[in-house]
Image (cartoon, helix red, strand yellow):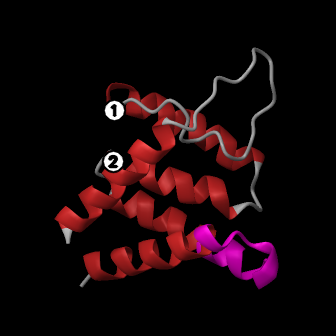
């Protein structure tokens, strides 16, 4: 279980590393920037930045889904699972054909991981 989670997190970080871009100075927050340029030695800073992204997009489940990964990397499973519960609740309010299928799959998988972790 922990090994599968570690592999999933590692794979996601590798995929995200190639897709990052630096925001321009003074540019507004974007809903997809929680996982840009992640380094484990600055994880607390990344979580703090992601907190601002989540606050800026309160009805968008995507930043919460991203922050789940950051909390998981930090070992804070309770916060990670709380984010996924909130993201899933928000996703249920979005018409099925309007929500990114990958996000829907991520939420489903991560909810299952949280349920298994509590048993």
- Position of the C terminus, as image quadrant, is bottom left
- At x 36%, y 74%, the residue is 114
Question: What numbered label is drawn on residue 73?
Answer: 2
Disc 1 residue crowd, few under 14, some 14–19, many 20+, Cα 10 Å: few
Residue in the image at 72% along x and 46% along y: 31
Q: Relative to residue 90, is residue 78 drawn left or right?
A: left
- Is 97 included in the stretch rendered in magenta? yes
Residue at the far top: name it.
25
Q: Where is residue 33 in the image (x, y as percent from the top left)?
A: 64, 39
Look at the numbered disc 1 and give the secondary structure of its residue: helix
In the rendered structure, the answer to whether residue 63 lies left or right of residue 98 reads left
Of the numbered discs in the image, which one, if any, rests on residue 87?
Answer: none
Residue 21 placement (x, y as % from top left): 63, 28
Q: Relative to residue 18, is residue 98 drawn left or right?
A: right
Whether 24 is drawn above or below 10: the answer is above
Q: In this view, does 36 lie above or below 64?
A: above
Quadrant position of residue 87: bottom right
Q: Are marks 2 and 1 in contact (CB under 8 Å)?
A: yes
Q: Which of marks 2 and 1 is nearer the N terminus?
A: 1
Reading the image, the residue beneath label 1 is 40
Residue 23 place in picture, x, y as percent = 70, 24
Front-lying residue, 86 or 3: 3
Q: Residue at x 41, y 45 (%)?
A: 13
Q: Which residues, given as a range, are shown in magenta?
A: 88-102
What residue is shown at x 39% (from left), y 43% (from top)?
A: 14
């Amino acid at each position: 279980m922990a090994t599968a989670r570690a592999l999933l997190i590692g794979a996601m970080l590798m995929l995200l590393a190639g897709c990052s871009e630096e925001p321009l100075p003074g540019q507004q927050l974007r809903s997809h920037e929680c996982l840009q340029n992640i380094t484990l030695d600055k994880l607390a800073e990344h979580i703090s930045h992601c907190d601002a992204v989540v606050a800026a997009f309160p009805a968008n489940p995507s930043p919460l889904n991203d922050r789940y990964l950051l909390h998981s990397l930090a070992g804070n499973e309770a916060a990670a699972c709380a984010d996924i519960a909130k993201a899933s609740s928000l996703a249920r309010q979005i018409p099925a054909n309007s929500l990114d299928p990958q996000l829907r799959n991520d939420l489903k998988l991560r909810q299952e991981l949280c349920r298994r972790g509590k048993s």
